[in-house]
Amino acid sequence: MTRVLIINDSNVMGTMLRDAIEAHDGLTVVGSTRGADEGLTVIEECGPDIVLINLLLPYIDGARLLSMLASRPALTKVVVSSQMRSRVEQKLVALGASALLEDGSVTSDPAGFCNKLLSVRQTDLAQRSPSSRGQAAAQHYLRIRSEGRFPIPGDEALRLQRLAKLQVANDDVDPCLDIIVRRLADQVGFPFAAVCVMDAEKSWSKAALGFSRGAYARDQSLCAHTLCAAEPTIVTDASTHPVFRQMDLVTKDPHIRSYAGVPIVAPDGLRLGTLCVADSRPRLIPEHVVSALLSAAGMAAEFLELENTGWRRTAA
């Protein structure tokens, strides 16, 4: 049972949060306070798994409370507010907020709100790492949000030259990659899977199952972030992710929620593209899914590199 502490100065919202959480099978309330001071005491005494924080707290506001809780990486910190602005979101993510949720969903869909809390907690547990890596990740997402662009590999110029040589940055479907994608999706039980390559502005689907084929703007592509990631990208609920939650693939059809992706790396280290699986519902990403992705990405790299030799074009 996941233990939740509510810190909210509104009696009405505090009661609604408590009622929603207590009605959920996987959550329980260990305390409900109207101020940060009392909340800190409950954290010391009860050790909750999740703390729900209202921004407009008396004396010590929500942002200050987040900074005070920075030394507690095991605690999942969720800000619940009536509205979020971009600058506020950036600050909260930098201060350690795991998710930012609208309080209106507590009344409109209490079960869905609670399921999101569990997804956020599961993501925290799955991605928990040394503090230095966590701080680097927070700074990475903050930088992307503030600059309004996608991440770019350090060897981007060489990578783009290789893609131009391979002639794969287009919407031509690759039958070999298509087989890899379909077998992977069947193996791990995900309805969506894709191999994508990224040119300077677009993410091209070379093989896709569930996704629309063609191109997406690179700044709207989850895989654009996977391309640069040092570790496999694991997201249990994209609707709560500080960057992905606003992307078209999340807010519109196919409404991606869970996502796992790895880069496709050539033998010389250049990242040619990505391989991913996804689902329209939040779900955990087991280790065997990541292992299958890494193995399939190796095969995809071999097929793409065959283009570099000209063998496949000659054979065709």
Image: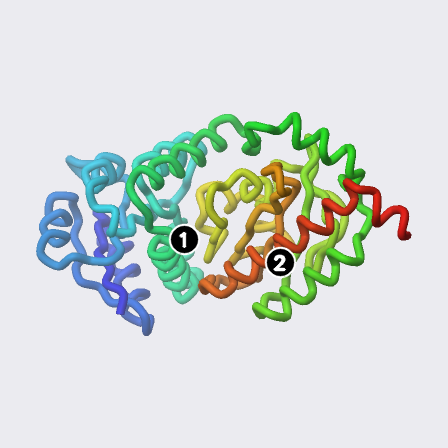
The residue carrying pointer 2 sits among few (fewer than 14), some (14 to 19) or many (20 or more) residues within 10 Å by Cα, namely many
Image coordinates of residue 250 in percent, x first then y, are: 57, 51
* Residue at left offset 55%, top offset 44%: 226
Q: Nearer the viewer, residue 100 or 93?
A: 93
Image coordinates of residue 108 in percent, x first then y, are: 44, 60
* Residue at left offset 26%, top offset 55%: 50
- Is 172 situated left or right of 179 in this image? right
Counting labels gives 2
Tell me if residue 90 comes above or below residue 313 in the rendering: above
Which residue, given by chain and number where applicable, does mark 1 sit on? 104
- Is 49 situated left or right of 315 in this image? left
* Residue at left offset 59%, top offset 38%: 269
- Circles 1, 2 touching at the beta carbon (< 8 Å): no
* Residue at left offset 41%, top offset 53%: 104
Give the quadrant of residue 81. Answer: top left
Q: Amino acid at mark 2?
A: Ala
Tell me if residue 246 comes above or below residue 189 in the rendering: above
Q: Quadrant of the N terminus?
A: bottom left
Give the quadrant of residue 177. Answer: bottom right
The residue carrying pointer 1 sits among few (fewer than 14), some (14 to 19) or many (20 or more) residues within 10 Å by Cα, namely some
Image coordinates of residue 166 in percent, x first then y, are: 78, 38
Q: Amino acid at mark 1?
A: Gly
Q: CA distance from mark 1 to mark 2?
A: 41 Å
From the viewer's perspective, is the residue at label 1 or at label 2 nearer?
2
Numbered disc 1: secondary structure: helix
Which residue, given by chain and number where applicable, does mark 2 sit on? 296
Badge 1 or badge 2: first in the primary sequence:
1
Numbered disc 2: secondary structure: helix
Tell me if residue 16 comes above or below residue 262 in the rendering: below
